[in-house]
Image (spheres, rainbow, N blue to C red):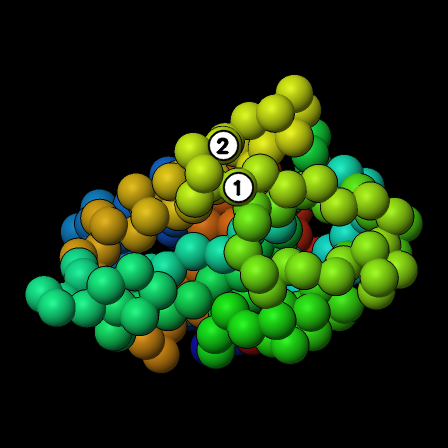
Amino acid sequence: MAIKNRYYYRSHFSERKFRQILRYFALDLTASDCARLTAISVRSCNCIYLKIRKRLAHAGALNNPICGELELDESYFGPRRVPGKRGRGASCKTIVFGILQRHGHVYTQIIPNTTRSVLRRAIRGSVDRHSIIHSDGLSGYDGLVDMGYAKHFRVFHGRGEYVRGDQHINGIESFWSYAKRRMSKFNGVPAETFYLHLKETEFRFNHRDQDLARLLMKMLRENPLK
């Protein structure tokens, strides 16, 4: 008979054991390290980690639309640049579009390319029309005011311009740095789970000043894993 567990329906782990797994997840330990410390199988830890990541991805999707003073940018994730391939044409990269609300949360989504039509679709689906937008000089961001957005300020990195008063995208660039540094410890994230790792990283960044273990326990008490 399955042991009663308020965090995970039909779980064979006691609540005490499951809280221990949650604490190790919150500390950002790998599933292998969690298995070693809890004396359960790596397969079981991986299964639980996957379910938690799916729950965090769902939570992140509830933040739209985003409104306020926002920073928009895109970044490339993947293996080191292949010799002979340059810049945005580098192969084997996953392109991620990000929106950071100043003094608030970040939101990310995977996009196929950085053409104007793709970026406009991503922005239109996630950004409130009353927002003030900051971006770099990428041509894909042209015409946002014509689309009905309140204000659009730009810094042109190609001209060596990174900050002009309060016009910059330093906040979202800090998130990219954090995300790439965190994911590098996995020595490569499989394409099929990259989205879940990305949304987990987003969640960790958005709640970096909170007790993540307590937050996860509260989330899962209200809506247990299945």
Q: State whether residue 96 is above or below residue 25.
A: below
Residue annotated with mark 2: 161
Instruction: Tell me if residue 160 comes above or below residue 112 in the rendering.
Output: above
Foreground: 99 or 191?
99
- Give the residue at the far front of this rendering: 159
Residue plotted at (25% across, 74% down): 91
Label 1 SS: loop
The reply to whether discs 1 and 2 touch (Cβ–Cβ < 8 Å) is: yes
Residue type, mark 2 in image: Glu
Left or right for 177, reference 188: right
Determine which quarter of the picture holds residue 164: top right
Q: Is residue 42 above or below residue 205?
A: below
Q: Which mark is residue 156?
A: 1
Q: Secondary structure at mark 2?
A: loop
Mark 2 residue crowding within 10 angstroms, few (<14) / some (14–19) / many (20+): few
The residue lying furthest to the top in this view is 165
Q: Residue at x 74, y 61 (%)?
A: 143
N-terminal label among 1 and 2? 1
- Return the x and y of residue 191 as percentages of the image width and height: 32, 76
Residue 49: percent from left, percent from top? 39, 62
Q: Is residue 86 left or right of residue 124?
A: left
Q: Amino acid at mark 1?
A: Phe
